[in-house]
Amino acid sequence: MYENMMKIEFLSKSQNESFARVAVAAFVSQLDPTVEEITDVKTAISEAVTNSIIHGYDNKEDEIVTIEGFIDKNELTVIVKDNGKGIDNVKLAMQPLYTSRPDLERSGMGFTVMETFMDSLQVQSEKYKGTKIIMKKVFKSIS
């Protein structure tokens, strides 16, 4: 069970990535995070949403990205979901520097960044049905 939760949906427009970051940061503020903790969460959210828009939806701006957030004591769970094209090989996609879009000037570090800034990362994906990224972070600054 959880003590608090939130859910937001927005169009897959690149400008909504900053909205997602700020919304999750506002939600997590109840845990009294440090600046470093909030920056970590915002960075991970940015990467997850960007992956949904660029890779899941091929930059189509009329699709939906969903973010759910759950707080239980001092732990945040964030789920970023899309109903895009899915990932063929999740294990391969999670390797540093791997990119499914070499035509773009991207570093292929999205999942690595998420893993670095969050305490756990799980990726569930089904071809032509979408991807769900589940990230968790424990906050040490809880009062």
Image (tube, grey):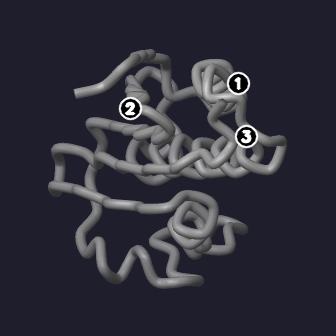
In front: label 1 or label 3: 3
Q: Is residue 43 visible?
A: yes
Amino acid on which disc 2 is placed: Asp
The one of 121 and 83 positioned closer to us in this rendering: 121
Task: Give the labeled residue for mark 1.
Answer: 22
Q: Are there few (<14), some (14-19), or many (20+) residues within 10 Å of tag 1?
A: some
Quarter of the figure with the N terminus = top left
Q: Is residue 127 above or below residue 38?
A: below
Q: Are marks 1 and 3 in contact (CB under 8 Å)?
A: no
Asked which quadrant contains residue 66, the reply is top left
Task: Give the labeled residue for mark 2.
Answer: 72
Q: Residue at x 70, y 51 (%)?
A: 40
Q: Residue at x 56, y 60 (%)?
A: 114
Q: Are marks 2 and 1 in contact (CB under 8 Å)?
A: no
Asked which quadrant contains residue 64, the reply is top left
Q: Is residue 15 visible?
A: no
For residue 63, the mark is none
Q: Position of residue 54 (x, y in %)?
A: 52, 48
**Alpha carbon of mark 2 to alpha carbon of mark 1: how far?**
20 Å
Task: Give the labeled residue for mark 3.
Answer: 38
Amino acid on which disc 3 is placed: Ile
Mark toward the start of the polypeptide (2 vs 3) = 3
Q: Position of residue 20 (x, y in %)?
A: 60, 27
